[in-house]
């Protein structure tokens, strides 16, 4: 069942997501050659708690950290560690917060120092895919219009969309219905309605779409070892259009 939210519930979701946005801005600012990713996790957790929220991923189905950190060929759900970032890496950071009963969820991928042209293009394509996916999240469209928009951008850029993980509804639960694949034919699935709140999260590989999960039970990596990027926003569908609740510097 898809839970529609009223305007006060959307305001609550916005507050949780704005904490997430601030955390992601802060950890991004710390990304540099020589930084270690466990330090980013500690910063994220501290900021979140200082804002009166609870890190949403810590302990979720046993995930052991607050911030998911996925470097280079890692797709999602990577573990922060004492390994140092180096120039040329790309690092995806995914953070969730629970505030007053409502969840925030957002992710970004940032370059470390100087990265390859391919890495730059991958980040640009994934960011644009999220933007276009959000633009398709309007009243009257159907669910698959989102994934279709994402897939079109990604494949035009010569990259591939991860199939194994999907976006999701979000609200009083981190993962609500519907599931939101990042691919598909347009015009399929449920109709999009005012009051739906969705986490749209394209994961894009420079090579093939296939991924596998490592022995740690969490870290998803590209099967072919190619780079992978991930951007995510939580949005609300309003009559006036999609509102990005996790936008940095305030929702739009
Ligand atoms: N954005 C991811 C998701 O929606 C983050 C979940 S990490 C987990 O699934 F640790 F909580 F699983
Ligand atoms: Co998510």
Image (spheres, helix red, strand yellow):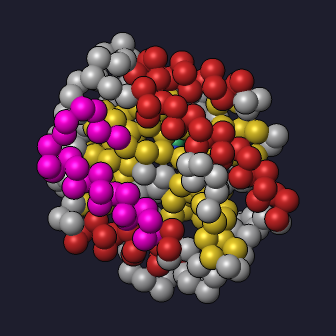
In terms of depth relative to the viewer, which is nearer, 143 or 1?
143
Q: Is residue 130 magenta?
A: yes
The location of residue 89, given as percent across then percent down, is 24, 33
User: Where 27 falls versus 204 (above or below)?
Assistant: above
The residue lying at 54 percent from left, 21 percent from top is 43
Q: What main secondary structure does the magenta stretch of the protein show?
A: helix
> In the rendered view, would you say 136 is above or below 25?
below
For this view, does 5 lie left or right of residue 153?
right
Which corner quadrant of the image does residue 11 belong to?
A: bottom right
User: In the image, what residue occupies the spot 54% across and 54% down?
Assistant: 233
Q: Residue at x 54, y 18 (%)?
A: 42
Identity of the residue furthest to the top in this view = 82
In this picture, which residue range is highlighted in magenta? 110-133
Q: How far across and how far down the image is residue 5, in percent?
A: 78, 64
Asked if one can make out residue 22 in the rendered structure from this viewpoint, the answer is yes
From the image, which quarter does the N terminus lie in?
bottom right
């Amino acid at each position: 069942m898809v839970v529609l939210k009223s305007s006060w519930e959307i305001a609550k979701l916005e507050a949780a997501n704005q904490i997430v946005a601030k955390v992601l801005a802060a950890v991004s600012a710390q990304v540099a050659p020589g930084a270690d990713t466990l330090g980013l996790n500690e910063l994220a957790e501290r900021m979140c708690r200082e804002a009166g929220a609870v890190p949403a991923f810590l302990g979720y189905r046993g995930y052991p950290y607050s911030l998911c950190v996925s470097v280079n060929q890692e797709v999602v759900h990577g573990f922060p560690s004492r390994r140092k970032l180096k120039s040329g890496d790309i690092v995806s950071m995914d953070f969730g917060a629970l505030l007053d009963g409502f969840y925030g969820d957002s992710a970004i991928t940032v370059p470390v120092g100087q990265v390859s042209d391919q890495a730059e293009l991958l980040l640009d394509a994934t960011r644009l895919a999220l933007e276009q996916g959000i633009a398709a999240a309007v009243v009257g469209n159907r669910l698959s219009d989102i994934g279709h928009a994402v897939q079109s951008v990604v494949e035009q850029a010569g990259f591939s969309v991860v199939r194994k993980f999907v976006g999701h509804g979000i609200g009083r639960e981190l993962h609500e219905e519907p599931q939101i694949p990042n691919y598909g034919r347009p015009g399929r699935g449920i109709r999009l309605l005012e009051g739906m709140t969705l986490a749209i999260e394209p994961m894009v590989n420079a090579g093939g779409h296939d991924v596998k999960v490592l022995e740690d039970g969490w870290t998803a990596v590209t099967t072919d070892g190619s780079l992978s990027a991930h951007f995510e926003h939580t949005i609300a569908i309003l009559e006036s259009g999609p509102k990005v609740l996790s936008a940095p510097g305030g929702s739009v």
